[in-house]
Image: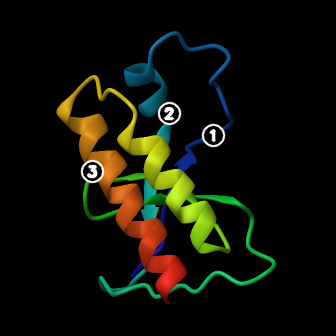
Amino acid sequence: GRLCEWKHKTIDKSEEIETFEEYKKTLTLQCKDGHAATFYWMPDEDTPDLVYYQCFTHRNLGWKIHVVDSDAKVAGAMEHLSNQEPNSAVTALLSHSLLLLVTFFVIF
């Protein structure tokens, strides 16, 4: 897909501004040419234990990906998530999404 970044119109004024709405007015969205695409990624031994994902196409779709290297760690992560009391449907959805991502990266 294409790369899009929010850049400062002049200089970073985040320390001077009190609200996000006002701060956003000091930024401009700059996108390179490109089209949506599928991103394939395979963790290796140099991959950090924690990486982050943010989808450009779907607003607020993104979170942490815990990278593990053994079935025991996956089982432990799944048990930890299943024992938590979700405080909202969103938390439950994110937990299940994380399980799917962790399982996917271990399998492939």
Q: Is residue 26 above or below residue 93?
A: above
Q: Is residue 90 left or right of residue 28?
A: left
Q: Where's residue 87, x and y in %? A: 28, 22
Res 78 visible: yes
Closer to us: mark 3 or mark 2? 3
Q: Say which residue appears at 30% left-offset and 29% top-offset.
A: 86
- Element type at marker 2? loop
Q: Is residue 76 above or below residue 106?
A: above
Residue 8 picture quarter: top right
Res 67 visible: no
Q: Say which residue appears at 43% left-offset and 84% top-offset.
A: 39
Q: 102 or 79, which is in the foreground?
A: 79
How crowded pointer 1 is (Cα within 10 Å; few <14, some 14-19, many 20+) is rated as few
The residue that disc 2 covers is 26
Q: Say which residue appears at 25% left-offset and 58% top-offset.
A: 58
| Marked residue nearer the N-terminal end (3 or 1) | 1
Image quadrant for the N terminus? bottom left
The residue that disc 1 covers is 10
The alpha-carbon separation of the residues under discs 1 and 2 comes to 8 Å
Closer to us: mark 3 or mark 1? 3
| Marked residue nearer the N-terminal end (1 or 2) | 1
Amino acid type, callout 1 = Thr
Q: Where's residue 93, x and y in %? A: 25, 46
How crowded pointer 2 is (Cα within 10 Å; few <14, some 14-19, many 20+) is rated as some
The residue that disc 3 covers is 59
| Marked residue nearer the N-terminal end (3 or 2) | 2
The alpha-carbon separation of the residues under discs 3 and 2 comes to 21 Å
Q: Is residue 100 left or right of residue 42?
A: left
Q: Is residue 96 above or below residue 16?
A: below
Q: Where's residue 52, x and y in %? A: 56, 57
Q: Where's residue 12, x and y in %? A: 67, 33
- Element type at marker 3? loop
